[in-house]
Amino acid sequence: MCRLVGIVASEITEFGLVLKEAPRSLARLSREHPDGWGVAAHGGPDSIPPPSERSPHDGIWRVHKGTNPAGECDRFLEIASRSAGTVLIAHVRQKTVGPTSIANTHPFVQSGWVFAHNGTLVDHASLRAQTSSARLAQVRGDTDSEVLFAYLLTRLDEAGLARVGASASARAEATRVIALAAEELRARKAGAFNFLLSDGASCFVHRFGRSLFLLERSPHDPPRARDAGAPGAPPGPWTPRRHAVLVASERLTEEPWRELPEGSLLRIDRGPTPTILWADTPERAAS
């Protein structure tokens, strides 16, 4: 068992609330999931600039990891206080496969992709057999999770989608490839595998075998959902353009989180407004 959080936002957003301040933040959840933490942020600076200087822009992933329980780690708490961006993938680990180590700590990063997993695969040896030697060579740790990441990247490589970016046709094809790979794993009863997979432009979200919830926050939300105390919200007023989609293993607040259906795959496209697209009908946004 692990816990993960993902955020896709239309503007640079501070992540401290979901990481350390919310009632069910990753720092608090690390009491039960103490075997390491990781934070990957895309877009925006490492330090939060004054509001007058904030503007959405593309950027590289900034990844930080540690092996201590997040809530007891000064480094995690310091990073959580200043982490900001347009996309967040964060994780606290309760180990099942592989010892506690930096190499086994999520999120994993390869070729501009970031990946975090919650669950246990019962036969990751078969995944290795279907994963390219090039991707296996990039595996640094001992987890089934990193092998699953390499396997999904292999499937994308085979489709010529090592890079997807902003191309609508490439994102639609990547959705089809990942959906097919996930469907095959579910049919083989390969185990539990919730995951977040993002290249900074889109975030693919899959649920199977573990709980997973989704929350949309938009400029049209009632004032109570726009308070600075809500997870993912920056301090100060909710701007007319700000829109965010949050995904988490647990409901982090009293807001109207939706439990994702078992076996579902969706894609969240980042900009200019985060849009949710389901794998069964990629052109249809979630209602």
Image (cartoon, rainbow, N blue to C red):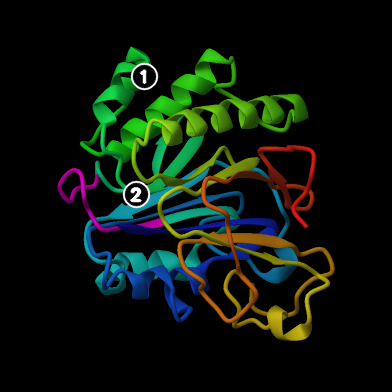
In the picture, the disc for residue 287 is none
Vertical position of residue 56 compared to residue 221: above or below: above
Which residue occupies 57% across, 33% down? 179
Q: Which residue is farthest bottom?
A: 224
56 lies above or below 234 = above
Name the quadrant of the N terminus.
bottom left
Question: Dot 1: few (<14), some (14–19), or many (≥20) neighbours within 10 Å?
Answer: many
Q: Which quadrant would the C terminus be assigned to in this image?
A: bottom right
State the residue in front, 248 or 135: 248
The secondary element bearing badge 1 is classed as: loop
Q: Nearer the viewer, residue 266 or 189?
A: 189
- Give the tally of numbered discs: 2
Name the residue: 30% across, 67% down.
70
Residue 262 showing in the rendered view:
yes
Q: Secondary structure at mark 2?
A: loop
**Type of residue at label 2?**
Gly
Residue 31 among those drawn in magenta: no
Q: Is residue 137 visible?
A: no
- Looking at the rendering, the stretch of residues picked out in magenta corresponds to 91-102
The reply to whether the C-beta atoms of the residues labelled 2 and 1 are less than 8 Å apart is no
Q: Position of residue 128 (x, y in %)?
A: 29, 22
- Is residue 98 a member of the stretch shown in magenta? yes
Q: Position of residue 244 (x, y in %)?
A: 68, 61
The residue carrying mark 1 is 131
